[in-house]
């Protein structure tokens, strides 16, 4: 009788171990799913920030390009003015 009870206890302990392993597996897969969801959320936040920063950088570059073109235009006008003045004075033929 003791041997039978001992065998039954071992069977029950084995079942408990299997159930615990399944529960741990479920907990792990739930944790993995939660981690994936968190990573996806963080990825979206990062992409949103990158898009915002990219827009700011592009706007800044456009402004710099406009200022550069304006300065280049000013320099060209000054150069033409100097050439006309020198031509009028007779230093340039």
Image: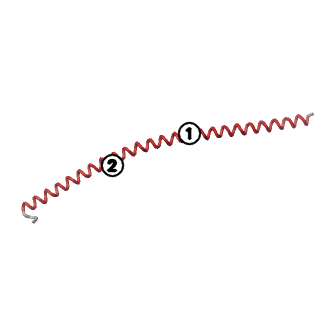
Instruction: Look at the numbered disc 1 and give the secondary structure of its residue.
Output: helix
In the orientation shown, which residue stands out farthest toward the bottom?
A: 93
Quarter of the view holding residue 27: top right
Residue 75 on image: x %, y %: 20, 55
User: Residue 31, image x and y in percent?
Assistant: 62, 39
Relative side of 8 to 52, left or right? right
Residue 84 is situated, as x and y percent measured from the top left of the image, at 11, 59
According to the image, label 1 marks what residue? Answer: 37
Q: Earlier in the sequence, mark 2 or mark 1?
A: 1
Q: Is residue 72 above or below residue 4?
A: below
Point 90% across, 35% down: residue: 4
What residue is shown with label 2?
61
Scheme of colours in the image: secondary structure
- Are there few (<14), some (14-19), or many (20+) residues within 10 Å of tag 2? few
For the point 7% across and 60% down, which residue is it? 88
Residue at figure coordinates x 27%, y 49% from the top left:
66
Kindly identify the residue that appears in the image at 77 percent across and 36 percent down.
16
């Amino acid at each position: 009788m003791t041997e039978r009870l001992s065998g039954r206890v071992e069977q029950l302990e084995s079942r408990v171990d299997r159930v615990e392993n399944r529960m741990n597996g479920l907990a792990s897969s739930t944790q993995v799913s939660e981690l994936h969801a968190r990573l996806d959320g963080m990825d979206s936040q990062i992409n949103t920030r990158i898009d915002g920063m990219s827009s700011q950088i592009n706007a800044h570059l456009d402004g710099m390009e406009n200022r550069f073109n304006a300065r280049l235009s000013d320099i060209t006008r000054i150069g033409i003015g100097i050439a006309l003045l020198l031509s009028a004075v007779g230093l340039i033929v």
